[in-house]
Amino acid sequence: MRLAGVAALLLPLAFILSQKTQAAASEKGVFISGGRFIPVFRSDNKKEPITVAPFWIDAYPVTVEAFNRFVKENPAWRKSKVKRLLADEGYLKSWRGDVLIEDDLKKMGKSPVTDVSWFAARAYAAWLGRRLPTTAEWEYLVATESGVETRRILDWYGKPTPEILPPVGSGISGKSAVRDLFGLVWEWVDDFGSDFIASDSRERGDDRNSRFCGSGSLGASDFENYAAFMRYAFRSSLKGSYTVHNLGFRTARSEE
Amino acid sequence: MNMKMILRMPWALTALVFIFGMTDCSRSQKIATGPLPEKSVYQVSSKWKDLSGKTISLADLRGKFRVLAFVYANCRNVCPLMVESMKTIEEGLRKKYGKRYGDQLGFVLITLDPKKDSPDSLRAFLDKIGTRPDTWTLLQGSEADTLELATLMDIKYRRLEDGEIAHSLTLTLLSPEGEILFQTESLGGKGKNFLDQIKKYF
């Protein structure tokens, strides 16, 4: 009888504790041990694998709710205050005000934040002592973690983006703890502009040839992986101040 | 009074340094006021170190036109060529405007490899190319800030597995307020196009 009483007392405690550890796990992100892999696309046309060092990555893309906390604390990143240099006119365009209120958050709080520039995404990550993942890290996740069929990815790439995005966790995910790499939003990476630089730009001459899709695709290690090539093409079409309605981000950090 | 005598008198030397320091200081202070224009890349808050180890922010570059390029010391092929073009531009300016061009325009090099480059390696790089240090500023930032500034200026680069860095060959002309006036990737024409652009503003 007494034992049951203690158990009854302990149970909710255990529940709270497990909730807490879960929250901590998702705050901390998912640990990726890294390794060597061959990226689908390389503009230098090399076939050797590249090395990805161990890192932590968010399980989900950053939500509107979380980004709202960031702009509350960092007024320089509010819609009305942000420098045009760092974010174009579309910055947070679906937000009704500088800071969202409860009503808005009910509607879109759990959706991934989009219409944010690379500079804004980086500032958010830095605010948490983190950074954006690199292209290599992001593609490593796809290569090793996602286990999603290319067909499904391509289907999603072909679909229009709804005005209010579905909540995080509802994207296309495999078995990995890293969710929503597909099916919800495209994601900023820290070195988004680097994909189309050919290594021979080190030599004197015109490197513009490598800037066009046609010649760039010569570097693709797998001609069938059209989905990956689309990602690289999309990334390299961006500029740091661009905001796009289906482009969000997640944060990462290196393993210390 | 000859130089030897000045050197024997520490106070005179101090006074000289002070006077030169002051003229330079008053010049830059006169200009660096007011909010920066919307498109100025000098709005970023990053901090940089120059060759003397002094920490500056980009807004400290206000007041002169700047010809800017991203390079790194170990870059053997294109960086010397980029700097070579900058030197050609410098020569052209000197011919047309004399030494006083330096009151209106300065050259800025930013290292793409801030972790590996040191003030010494950068100085050696400049020495080898033979630039005149009075109108050249060499800046070293953090890796994240370097990427930020490069992105603002649409300069792309990528570290290769062998440690070299593939990068855009872009030369940029900045207004005295840090706005991008002109960019070119072409190393041909020996900087002539670029010089023509500068002349438009002088």
Image: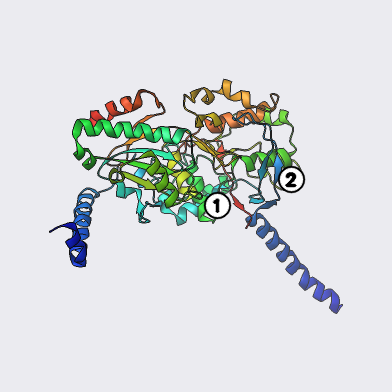
x, y percent for residue A232: 59, 31
x, y percent for residue B170: 41, 32
Between B6 and B110, the one nearer to me in the picture: B6
- Residue visible at 30% across and 50% down in the picture: B60
Q: Which mark is residue A66?
A: 1
Between B202 and B19, the one nearer to me in the picture: B19
Instruction: Look at the image and tell me whether residue A217 can be seen.
Output: yes
**Alpha carbon separation for disc pair 2 and 1:** 23 Å
Q: Chain ID for label 2?
A: A
Between B60 and A181, the one nearer to me in the picture: B60
x, y percent for residue A63: 58, 47
Image-based side of A230 in relation to B128, left or right: right
Image-based side of B189 in relation to B166, left or right: left
Name the amino acid type tagged 2. Answer: Ser
Q: Decide: few, some or many residues near mark 2? Use Cα within 10 Å; few <14, some 14-19, many ≥20.
A: some
Name the amino acid type tagged 1. Answer: Ala
Compared with A225, B128 (above or below) is below
According to the image, label 2 marks what residue?
A176
